Amino acid sequence: MAFAININRLRDMLAGLAQRLRWSRLVHLAGWAAFIAVLVWFYRIPPWMWATHMPAPPDPLEALWQIEFWRHAVLTADFDLVSVTAMYPLGLHQMTIAHSGTGLLLLPIALLAGSAVALNVGFVGGQILCFLGARYFLKQLVASTSLTYIGAIVFTFAFGRTVHTRIHLNMLLGSALSVWMAALLLRLGRQEHAHRERGLAIASGVLWGMAILAQAYALFHNLPLFVLLGRRWQAWRYLPLIGATALVVSGPFLYALFQGSAYMSFIGPSLASIVYFQSAPASFVGWGPFSNWRLLADWTAAWRQVLAEQYAQNWGVVAPALAAIGGVISWRAKWARSLVILLLVSAVLSFGPLWESPPLVGRGAFASINESIWQVGRQLKPRLFSPRSESLKADTMPLPSMALLVFVPRYEFARVPGRYAIWLGLAVVALTVAVLGRFPGRWGVAIGCLWLLELLPLPQAAHPVPTRPHPAHAWAAEWMRTQPRTDLGVYSPPGIISTYSHYLSGDLPGAITFGSFVAAHLRYTRPWITFAHIPVDPPLEALADPSNVAILRRAQIGLVLLRPEAAALAKQNTALRFVRCFDPGPEVETYYPYPLCAFEVLPRDDDFFNIQPVNGFGEFNANSTWVVETHAGAGWRTTWPAPHTVELILHPRCPLDGQLSVQVYLNGRLLGAHTWPGANSCGEPWVASLGVNAAQLKSGWNALELRVVLGSSDEANLIQSPYLEVKRLRVSRQDDSPGLER
């Protein structure tokens, strides 16, 4: 009898286990079905269209260009990392482009299936990778399988990733890899088996390194994730191993990035630009413009400013409310403390270095503190604390990340504080799901489904992959082939759409600006060429003043392409000759909707300075400029090295209180030198004509440098900037009529 009872009990246990397994399988199937449904709803480009369509320009065009660059480099064995398609004449170093690492990561797919397919695989694959990583992260914290699926879907498509899911493939992939890093760090902080810890640490480092490849900002942006290691010293002692592994994976990429920024004499961001991209507390509540619910998005826009990407984030109201509750009621649990700390640290970092117009604080309350910060900042990072940021001292309160900006080398290169909100979102999702798990019965899952519906994203529209350049760029490429003078470039409105159209025109050399990196030579191209991300017309002073066209001649610009409104003003400029206008046509309008009008830059031979200044010079007047640093660089681009002449007229600053010398280097080799021994020779200029043979030149960019050499240290204290007045610096071919090339 007892035996029969035990058999029945065993049968009931097995039946219950089978039922639970069937139910668990159904839950997993439902979770995957929900994710796929949201993914299909959001990404409206089916796989059979991946070779011909892509997400809406402009930003995805940068990713497509970089994927195609690396694919072409491998297939042709041409690994020249300087592209003249943008930022001509110096050129744009490929490693400084935000999506260069993304192009490398997607290179295998591009080689097998093409660049457009690789782009779409990157967008869709990045969503899947993020979903799996977020689900793995939440599984370690929440018992409910249903809620882990819901939370993973929300994190994948909303919160801090809202904008990146649509346009920033580098941040999409970087955050997808990083959430896996977060999951492994969480597991390492909770791991009780020592033999597994080393493997988790190495895997975390690999993922960190790959995230840096996708987006170099991850070098700093992933640091808050280490709070997930918790309070176990056993876990924290693996931090050097994690960092070393990440450095092994990303080190060559970071070295190439630093080489690229050095080549371009990269100007780091100013404090004002960093403050522009920081978050505000209001950005973490409400529905952004990428919410599917237009009524809610429009209502939010009435009280939440929509400027930079953090204001476009889609947070809703359910998660902020439940996460606050979850942080309070779960604080005593060890797993919750690290999440709350992650939330607070990420929030503070996303708020940036300064709080503008803080409430309940009078104007100027922190002025003396800010003045002290500015004094230290100008000494350590003068470009960060540029004159452009002076106005921020009056009505702002410094926040903790200001200390990081001032004292941590290159921390400002993380550039966009608002992106720390990605990890704020991860903590919010975990705490919200934990609260939903406390609801009785299936109420938590039901509310979770409504939460998912609340944050449903606006569908991503499909756009044709551009295959034809703008007619103006195609014509410009043909025009340049007929010119007797080589090495001319074309001015086009700024932005990646211009750059990509130049690329489709056969890498048409272009004085175009876009992206995150600002080349130093752009300081000397204003008002004609300024750093911008979208088409912006030059100001009136550039278009109407013939003297400002000298800026274009120094930059070896032969053609100027302008939108019609700007072209109407440029027709009055006697230094430009109008040629004709071009309409984009229906195929090109899908990505470049602007008509462009072409102007020829008329040559002149009376410019005192006829090559491109890069750094170390002051403002340019009509007849002179000053050397204001001990190293002043300039250069020009040539295709066919040939004998040249460098003409110089340099005046030392008066009164000359000590010995002053200047050395002229060409491509790193000494070309000539002169010394003013003292005040008696102050009024005597150095007039020189230096010959350059073809062997001293390179095909491509040739760098000319003026190095100011001061006397003893005592004399160096007497001679202050500016050092030299440049009355003439002209470069010409010895066998050429006026002009650099023919």
Image (cartoon, helix red, strand yellow):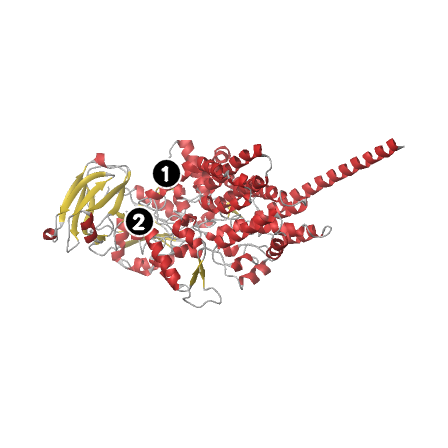
Q: Is residue 227 visible?
A: yes
- Residue nearer the viewer, 425 or 557: 425
Classify residue 661 as left or right of residue 406. Answer: left
Question: What percent of the width, then of the height, locates residue 593?
Answer: 44, 52
Question: What percent of the width, then of the height, locates residue 330?
Answer: 63, 52
Q: Earlier in the sequence, mark 2 or mark 1?
A: 1
Q: Circles 2 and 1: CB distance less than 8 Å? A: no
Classify residue 90 as left or right of residue 734. Answer: right
Q: Amino acid at mark 2?
A: His
Residue 521 numbered mark, or none:
2
Q: CA distance from mark 2 to mark 1?
A: 18 Å
- Residue nearer the viewer, 113 or 211: 211
* The C terminus lies in quadrant: top left
> Mark 1 highlights which residue?
81
**Farthest residue in the front direction?**
233
Q: Quick one: SS at disc 2?
A: helix
Q: Amino acid at mark 1?
A: Leu
Question: What percent of the width, then of the height, locates residue 461?
Answer: 54, 49
Question: What percent of the width, then of the height, locates residue 24?
Answer: 71, 40
* The N terminus lies in quadrant: top right
Total numbered labels? 2
Q: Quick one: SS at disc 1?
A: loop
- Crowd around label 2: few <14 · some 14–19 · many ≥20 (10 Å): many
